[in-house]
Image (cartoon, helix red, strand yellow):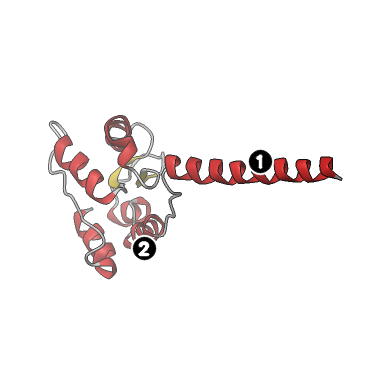
Amino acid sequence: MVARCLEAARPFAGRISVLDLRTIIPWDQEAVLENVRQTGKVLIVHEDTLTNGFAGEICAVVVSQAFTDLDAPVEPIGVPDIPIPYNIRMMNAIVPSVASIRATMERLLAFYTLPAWNDFFHARSTEIFAFDCSLQQNQKAIKAC
């Protein structure tokens, strides 16, 4: 999968970092979390099924330990929930392709995040306050008439 990921990331040079977890027991949680903190986005590509695959463990750790650093949903890509065939042609048909990996990379890179909640809240409370002030002025003007 690393070769497919590197090929899919080629058009996005400098915008995507590929981290190869060579082992899953133990797996390098610190490297993954550091990468999440730097990029804000996570795409997990693996040859296992989506249900009960190891991507679920990575997603759980990322969400529990680096949720506030995420700018987009965590995206796992894997094999559909079917038995993995031993025939190489059939296996290549179900394993994530370069095109599907690239499409997901594009979607994640284009993912728009809203401003931080505090910025959003303060902007909205200012607008509401401004509205309340103008409403009070209008009520004073009506009473004066």
Disc number lying in front (1 or 2): 1
User: For residue 49, which quarter of the picture?
Assistant: top left
Q: Residue at x 17, y 35 (%)?
A: 29
N-term-proximal mark, 1 vs 2: 2
Graded by Cα atoms within 10 Å as few (under 14), some (14 to 19) or many (20 or more), the crowding at tag 2 reads few
Query: Which three-letter amino acid code belongs to the residue tagged 2?
Result: Ala
| Label 1 to label 2: alpha-carbon separation | 53 Å
Q: Which mark is residue 99?
A: 2
Residue 33 percent across, percent down from the top left: 21, 39
Q: Which mark is residue 80?
A: none
Badge 1 element: helix
Q: Residue at x 83, y 40 (%)?
A: 143
- Work out whether 123 lies above or below 14: above
Q: Is disc 1 in contact with disc 2, using a CB cutoff of under 8 Å?
A: no
Nearer to me, 5 or 80: 5
Graded by Cα atoms within 10 Å as few (under 14), some (14 to 19) or many (20 or more), the crowding at tag 1 reads few
Residue 108 percent across, percent down from the top left: 38, 55
Which image quadrant: the C terminus?
A: top right
According to the image, label 1 marks what residue? 132
- Work out whether 3 lies above or below 53: below
User: For residue 111, which quarter of the picture?
Assistant: bottom left
Q: Is residue 123 left or right of residue 91?
A: right
Nearer to me, 14 or 79: 14
Badge 2 element: helix
Q: Residue at x 82, y 43 (%)?
A: 144
Query: Which three-letter amino acid code belongs to the residue tagged 1?
Result: Asp
Nearer to me, 14 or 43: 14
